[in-house]
Image (cartoon, grey):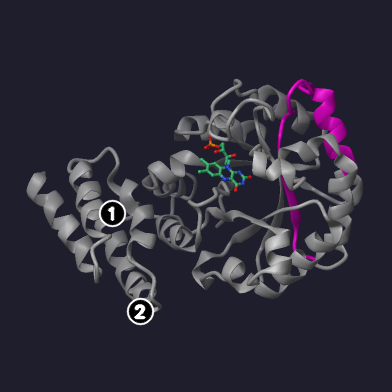
Amino acid sequence: MTINISVAPMMDWTDRHCRYFMRLLSPSVFLYTEMVTAAAIYHGDSDRFLRFNDEEHPLALQLGGSDPKWMASAASKAHDYKYDEININVGCPSDKVQSGQFGACLMATPDTVAECYRAMKDITDIPITVKTRIGIDNLDSYEFLVNFIEPLIDAGCRKFIIHARIAVLDGLSPKENRMVPALNYNRVYRLKHDFPDLEIVINGGLTDITQVEHVLQHLDGAMIGRQAYYQPYFLAELEQYFNPQSALPDRRDIVEQMLPYIDEVIQYGEPIGRVTRHMLGLYAGQPGARKWRRSISENAHRKGAGVEILIDALNAMSIAA
Ligand SMILES: Cc1cc2nc3c(=O)[nH]c(=O)nc-3n(C[C@H](O)[C@H](O)[C@H](O)COP(=O)(O)O)c2cc1C
């Protein structure tokens, strides 16, 4: 059974450790990598950016870039690594991204994105999708959004993930750009109404099951960002709600299932904190949540810290409760 819910690509957050943890909470949610630039894959140690654990499937690689040659080369690598989807980032508003000519600023040059799309499609049969905004700066109209997607439809794109607010490229930080201006779900609903054959996934501000259920009445999928990170157990609740055969997992079992994984990560020389930082929200809203966070945060950075710090955190919590 698959559910039409995905976890958003989030730089510095949805790395492979985070995704392994999220997968334990939800067997079927679709996961996205952090954005990787096509240039980094082209010039750098691509395995560092591309490797993942088999358990993470279904998994999409998100790429940033606007050079068809580099994007095609990155797509070819994604093919070899057996990603389930490749997603082009046309939504990120940061300065760094704009100077590299990718991200949300590319909404103004749809033919460039379509050219990348075609070059990638020639290389692989993995579905290629686009994540975008509903507009940028003063280009804030339904017609602008349609003008952006039409060349991509011609190039073969059938799935769009739409963060339902415009990106303000001048004057707002990336963080501010995730809070203002207001979300406009209606523009996304209208797009689906006018292009019923496209798969339209909505993103932005989804924090509870009722909201998700509501948007799914209009659209094909819902993508969750911050809520999935701050309150990862939300993913288990979504899984259970939309896939009622699955039982809600016990949080302690999830922690126990993480232990062998973390042991292996440590054996490969990575500090435990690289994994445990993603687990801090596991008990959000539960009794003892603060003890859990504090115990891990205080102990994870200690030299030689191992999985016992998670057992200690569980114990600290049950003493507190
Ligand atoms: C820490 C962080 C990093 C992000 N990095 C990316 C990224 O690499 N690529 C991308 O397309 N969007 C990125 N985003 C935006 C999210 O994918 C998503 O569109 C946004 O958070 C709105 O969804 P939400 O309201 O459910 O959080 C990031 C968001 C956050 C909070």
Q: Amino acid at mark 1?
A: Arg
Asked if residue 11 lies left or right of residue 127, the reply is left
In percent of width and height, residue 137 lies at: 73, 24
Which SS class for mark 1?
A: helix
In percent of width and height, residue 209 lies at: 46, 35
| Residue 251's disc number | 1
State the residue lying farthest toward the left.
319
Q: Amino acid at mark 2?
A: Gln
Residue nearest the viewer, comparing 161 with 93: 93
Residue nearest the viewer, comparing 167 with 146: 167
Ligand 1 is within 8 Å of the C-beta of the residue at disc 2: no
Residue identifier under label 2:
267
Which SS class for mark 2?
A: helix
Q: Is residue 171 above or below residue 47?
A: above
Q: Is residue 271 above or below residue 289?
A: below
Q: Which residues are magenta?
A: 125-151
- Quarter of the image that includes the C terminus: top left
Quadrant assignment for ligand 1: top right
Distance from disc 2 to disc 1, alpha carbons, whole Å, reads 25 Å
Q: Is residue 278 above or below residue 163?
A: below
In percent of width and height, residue 142 lies at: 80, 24
- Quarter of the image that includes the N terminus: bottom right
